[in-house]
Image: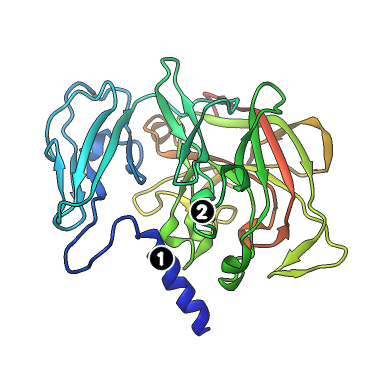
Amino acid sequence: MKLTRLLSCLFLCIIGMSCIQDEAQNAEADIEDCIVPADILRRDPIITNDKVTLMVKADTDLSKQSPEFTLTPGATISPASGTTRDFSEPQYYTVTSEDGNWKKRYEVTYIVTGIGTEYNFENVKHAGTAGYDVFYETDKNGNTIMDWASGNPGFALTDMNAKRDTFPTLSSSNGYKGNCVKLVTRSTGDFGSRLGMPIAAGNLFMGTFDILSAVTNALKATKFGMPFEYVPTYLTGYYKYKAGPEFSESGKIVSGKKDMFDIYAIFYETTDNVKMLDGTNKFTHPNLISIARIEDPKETDEWTQFYLPFKTQPGKTIDRDKLKAGKYNVAIVFSSSVEGDLFNGAVGSTLYIDEVELIHSLEE
């Protein structure tokens, strides 16, 4: 227990190592919060290491916006917080730490366009010191409208020297058409095993990955959902899958048990108290409206189509006004190990995903 606590502290220290050097003088240079008028937002701001994304309503005037920022103590920002700027294109800010030794450049983007409904996974950028893959979606003008989330940032902390092609979530050129997503269940090595997290399933999902929760409550680290103004009816696409040779639970091999992948989507209502669902309540929360989930997963070397209907939860209906106002979220999720969120699975299990479409109707 003492060793686990020690490693947990070390894990959290690593997360902040790029920002904290000397507590006597604050060396952090981070944006902690972004404040804009609540009536223009479709969801809470998404803040990552170097980017702030604001999903706003269609009638928002992007030419005159004045976002305000909460920074780490003592830090400053240029241009100043509250400066009015034209966000028809992304704008950039530089945050300087209190001690003046650290600077970080943030891209701030206002997004009016929805998340889109067709995903071919051709757009990939690189993040972190290892340059791991991040998939993203663009609008017809080439502007980024959504970054897909994954557990790659957490995996990066288990091996600071990991190479791009050793991460659980990565791009592959062997797609059904062009490039595709490749999800691989990986070992997290001695470090992860000591934390009770011996494997990392390859995953890709709509939402955000909260790295600060990754050790203390891993299921809450996956935040599912993006605003969606339509009623989803089907999720379709193509997959290939090969299970790894040995299934393990809590780091111990389970003889005779075979790994399997998972594909699902959830559609749910948001409220002031329920902004996003997470790994603890993705299938059980009372705000769920409908769920689409693969029921007959199988190993296959050939590209195989899936066509999953959204099944409405008992007694659930949709409020048209709330739907139009963006008060419902949808999340699409892929994982190379169905029990990967519990750190059970087979190292080497590999799932390929391509040409996904979220089919919807305007009516319930």
The residue pinned by badge 2 equals 156
| 89, above or below 209, in the image | above
Left or right for 344, reference 141 = right
The answer to whether one can see residue 169 in this image is yes
Q: Where on the picture, by quarter, is residue 227?
A: top left
At x 79%, y 49%, the residue is: 243
- Determine crowd level at label 1: few under 14, some 14-19, many 20+ residues with C-alpha closer than 10 A: some
Task: Judge by depth and name the residue closer to the eye, 28 or 63.
Answer: 28
- Determine crowd level at label 2: few under 14, some 14-19, many 20+ residues with C-alpha closer than 10 A: many
x then y, percent, for residue 268: 50, 44
Left or right for 37, reference 220 = left
Task: Judge by depth and name the residue closer to the eye, 336 or 310.
Answer: 336
Instruction: State the quadrant of the C terminus.
Output: top right
Q: Where on the picture, by quarter, is residue 279?
A: bottom right
At x 31%, y 31%, the residue is: 109
| 164, above or below 253, in the image | above
x then y, percent, for residue 115: 46, 29
Count of marks placed on residues:
2
Label 1: which secondary element = helix
x then y, percent, for residue 206: 51, 40
The residue pinned by badge 1 equals 12
Of all residues, the one furthest to the right in this rendering is 256
At x 41%, y 62%, the residue is: 14
At x 17%, y 58%, the residue is: 73
The answer to whether one can see residue 285 in this image is no
> Colour scheme in the image?
rainbow
Q: Are marks 2 and 1 in contact (CB under 8 Å)?
A: no
Name the residue type under label 2.
Ala
Q: CA distance from mark 2 to mark 1?
A: 13 Å
